[in-house]
């Protein structure tokens, strides 16, 4: 078997100040260059610089389907950007053998004024297809996207679902030797997601090399044989996908039990005027935190560092593989909500009866204030649900499927 | 299960063995000017130019007519103020024709500069998500401008004929003059588009700079107004040779300004090479800044 991707000491450094603001003005650069000649080599490890990827040496054989796993900011997307030549490494090198197709975001390169037909050609060639290849697969793409009737309509008149379907359809019909995919399966409705996943499975089984990034560990586990766990720009585990996922879940749980302020995988969009300090879930039986019982009244408490006006919180409960189950958002308010008159650093979400089956669950937290995202953490907390009773009915019913149990009542014949 | 009937991965029969590309930090000049790289992405180059052409007048009422309305509008205004009121000399030619023959190449150049310098920033989503030779962005704009130029050139010649003038054989030099204008435009626009990625000041400088450049170019006045040696020196501005050349080529008046065209051609080549070289040097960092 031949090697598809080989990296040796690969590293990418970003300059934080400039990167954060996006761009500077000419005046700033001029005054900067007058003040000093530019950073010394020793400054590169200082606080102004971030090694998004550091000293990464991996080898991927052709035909392997590899999942990259890790927190936000672990360097997964940076690695894909380097491998797809969007940006250059700062040090080290990567040898890439074969045509690379990258799918870092669905629909890049769509032009709203162009029709569906024109965009298929434009997007196809942007993704590296020959014109003749696109022509050959045109009907397949249109059929997959389910947009036959709108082929000659400008894409700006498409519903978001339609344009996403079209974008994915073009990308899925690429035939590169190496395919780099970043978090693109979470598009469209459930039926289309299933179809996309089926398509990816097909692609993965055709002997092509695929490097795959997703926060959805269930998808990674289903598609990939090998998993690479990344932390702070380095590969910390590499092996069979199940093993790597377990290791990641372990590290997530350890991180959740530590002080949340020490976490570095926070939501990048956050303004961080206030930050997430602690998350705790308890039921009213007075037991230990993070162990709760099905059907009990439950309180999820969130503590933040600074009191800020109109703090809002969105909680997502996911299964241990990261598949979201439900979301509770304080921005969508109800008369039973209560907002205190004074500032504070603690907020609570109360559930009158916990509708979850026994198992381990994950809690993702997103904080907002004044429409701005302040802070966010995936896997901010983990908790264990133990068997209980809902409306007098034992949970779990034997042989239960799924994660959720709904309060319900039967009316049965004699 | 259907997998039992699935064929083993078919051997790829097409093409030679896949080549290995080494991705590593580069210095100096490396990428844009690599012809193999440009050739590999030729289909994309065509698609981008096609997109720029198609999109330019989508959802406009007048469509391609805008290609000529802009120079025609300027012609009317210039004729009124500079021709009639100020009485600017026009080499014995009717002032409207004198200015339109200059405005046709000038509009091509100015639009290429204006749109080209913004092309990378306007396509930042692409630049930060997909690899392709970035030079296609400003180049696509320049190529799309040829369509406008062709339309306005046809109208110019029609007006010249209606006026009762007959272009001479000199009209065959038009492609050469267009090439000079395109080289100068691409060189300047690609350098500006690259600077624009880092410093958005370019957005404010360019429209203003184009205005200044218009008056530094003999569009409303004949370059003979400058007198020697300034007339010859002014041809360092590549549009001087192009504009004076266009008048001679389409209106068939006066002696061929070969000295101006020659100097402008050299200076356009310098702009072209320098602009692309600068673009090439900074291209590798676009995705980090855009």
Image: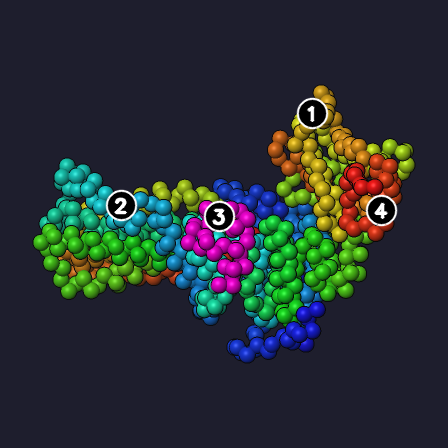
* Dot 4 or dot 3, earlier in sequence: 3
- Viewer-proximal residue, A107 or A267? A107
Check the picture and name the quadrant holding the N terminus of chain B: bottom right
Q: Position of residue A38 (x, y in %)?
A: 58, 50
Quick check: marks 2 and 1 in contact, CB under 8 Å?
A: no
Instruction: Find the residue positioned furthest to the front.
Output: A414
Quadrant for residue A262, please give it: top right
Residue positioned 14% across, 53% down in the render: B160
Which numbered disc covers residue A397?
A: 4
- Single out the mark in the foreground, 2 or 3: 3
Quick check: marks 2 and 4 in contact, CB under 8 Å?
A: no
In the rendered image, residue B152 lying in the magenta stretch gets the answer no
Element on which disc 4 rests: loop
CA–CA distance in space, label 1 to label 4: 34 Å
Q: Which residue is mark 1?
A: A335
Confirm whether circles 4 and 3 share one chain.
yes
Element on which disc 2 rests: helix
Quadrant for residue B26, please give it: bottom right
Q: Which residue is mark 3?
A: A158
Q: Chain of mark 3?
A: A
Q: Tell me if residue B254 comes above or below residue A274 in the rendering.
A: below
Instruction: Find the residue positioned furthest to the top.
Output: A341
Element on which disc 3 rests: loop
Image side of residue A13 versus residue A285, left or right? left
Q: Tell me if residue A329 comes above or below residue A46 in the rendering.
A: above
Element on which disc 1 rests: loop
Residue positioned 81% across, 35% down in the render: A353
Q: Position of residue A125 (x, y in %)?
A: 48, 62
CA–CA distance in space, label 4 to label 3: 45 Å
């Amino acid at each position: 078997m031949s090697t598809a991707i080989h990296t040796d000491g690969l590293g990418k450094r970003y300059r934080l100040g400039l990167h954060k603001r996006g761009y500077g003005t000419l005046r700033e650069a001029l005054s900067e260059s007058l003040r000093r000649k530019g950073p010394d080599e020793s400054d590169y490890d200082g606080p102004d610089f971030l090694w998004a990827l550091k000293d990464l040496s991996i080898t991927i054989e052709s035909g392997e389907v590899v999942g990259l796993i890790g927190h936000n900011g672990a360097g997964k997307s940076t690695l894909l950007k380097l491998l797809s030549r969007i940006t250059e490494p700062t040090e080290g090198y990567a040898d890439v053998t074969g045509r690379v197709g990258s799918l870092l975001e669905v629909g890049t390169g769509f032009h709203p004024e162009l029709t569906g037909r024109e965009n298929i050609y434009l997007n196809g060639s942007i993704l590296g297809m020959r014109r003749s290849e696109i022509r050959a697969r045109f009907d397949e793409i249109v059929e997959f996207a389910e947009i036959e009737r709108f082929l000659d309509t400008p894409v700006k008149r498409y519903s978001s679902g339609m344009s996403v379907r079209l974008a994915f359809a073009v990308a899925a019909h690429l035939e590169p030797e190496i395919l780099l995919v970043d978090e693109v399966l979470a598009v469209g409705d459930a039926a289309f997601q299933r179809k996309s996943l089926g398509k990816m499975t097909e692609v993965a089984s055709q002997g092509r090399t695929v490097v795959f990034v997703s926060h959805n560990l269930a998808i990674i586990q289903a598609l990939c044989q090998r998993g690479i766990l990344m932390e702070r720009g380095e590969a910390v585990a590499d092996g069979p996908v199940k093993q790597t996922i377990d290791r990641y879940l372990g590290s997530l749980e350890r991180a959740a039990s530590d002080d949340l302020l020490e976490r570095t995988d926070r939501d990048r969009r956050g303004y961080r005027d206030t930050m997430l300090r602690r998350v705790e879930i308890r039921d009213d039986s007075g037991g230990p935190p993070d162990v709760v019982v099905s059907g009990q009244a439950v309180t999820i408490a969130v503590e933040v560092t600074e009191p800020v006006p109109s703090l809002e919180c969105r909680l997502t409960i996911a299964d241990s593989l990261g598949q979201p189950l439900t979301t509770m958002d304080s921005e969508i308010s109800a008369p039973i909500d209560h907002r205190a008159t004074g500032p504070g650093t603690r907020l609570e979400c109360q559930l009158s009866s916990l509708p979850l089956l026994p198992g381990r669950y994950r809690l993702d937290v997103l904080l907002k204030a004044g429409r701005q995202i302040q802070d966010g953490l995936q896997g901010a907390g983990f908790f264990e649900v133990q068997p209980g009773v809902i409306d007098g009915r034992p949970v779990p019913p034997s042989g239960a499927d799924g994660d959720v149990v709904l309060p319900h009542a039967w009316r049965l014949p004699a | 299960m259907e997998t039992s009937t699935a064929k083993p991965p078919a051997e790829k029969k097409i093409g030679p063995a896949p080549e290995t590309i080494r991705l590593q930090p580069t210095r100096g000049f490396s990428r844009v000017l690599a012809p193999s790289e440009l050739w590999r992405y030729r289909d994309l180059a065509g698609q981008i130019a096609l997109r720029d052409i198609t999109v330019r007048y989508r959802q406009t009422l007048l469509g391609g007519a805008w290609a000529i309305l802009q120079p025609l509008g300027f012609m009317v205004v210039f004729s009124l103020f500079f021709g009639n009121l100020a009485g600017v000399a026009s080499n014995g030619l009717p002032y409207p024709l004198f200015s339109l023959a200059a405005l046709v190449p000038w509009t091509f150049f100015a639009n290429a500069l204006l749109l080209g310098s913004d092309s990378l920033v306007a396509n930042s989503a692409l630049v930060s998500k997909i690899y392709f030779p970035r030079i296609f962005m400003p180049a696509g704009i320049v190529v799309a401008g040829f369509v406008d130029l062709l339309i306005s050139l046809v109208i110019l010649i029609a007006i010249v004929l209606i006026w009762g003038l007959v272009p001479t054989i000199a009209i065959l030099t038009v492609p050469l003059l267009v090439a000079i204008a395109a080289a100068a435009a691409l060189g300047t626009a690609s350098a500006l588009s690259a600077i624009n990625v880092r410093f958005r000041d370019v957005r404010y400088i360019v429209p203003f700079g184009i205005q200044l450049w218009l008056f530094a170019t003999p569009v409303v006045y004949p370059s003979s107004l400058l007198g020697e040696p300034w007339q010859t020196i002014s041809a360092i501005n590549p549009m001087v040779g192009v504009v004076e050349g266009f008048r001679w080529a389409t209106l068939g008046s006066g002696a061929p300004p070969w000295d101006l065209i020659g100097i402008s051609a050299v200076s356009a080549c310098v702009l072209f090479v320098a602009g692309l070289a600068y673009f090439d040097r900074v291209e590798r960092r676009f995705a980090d800044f855009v």
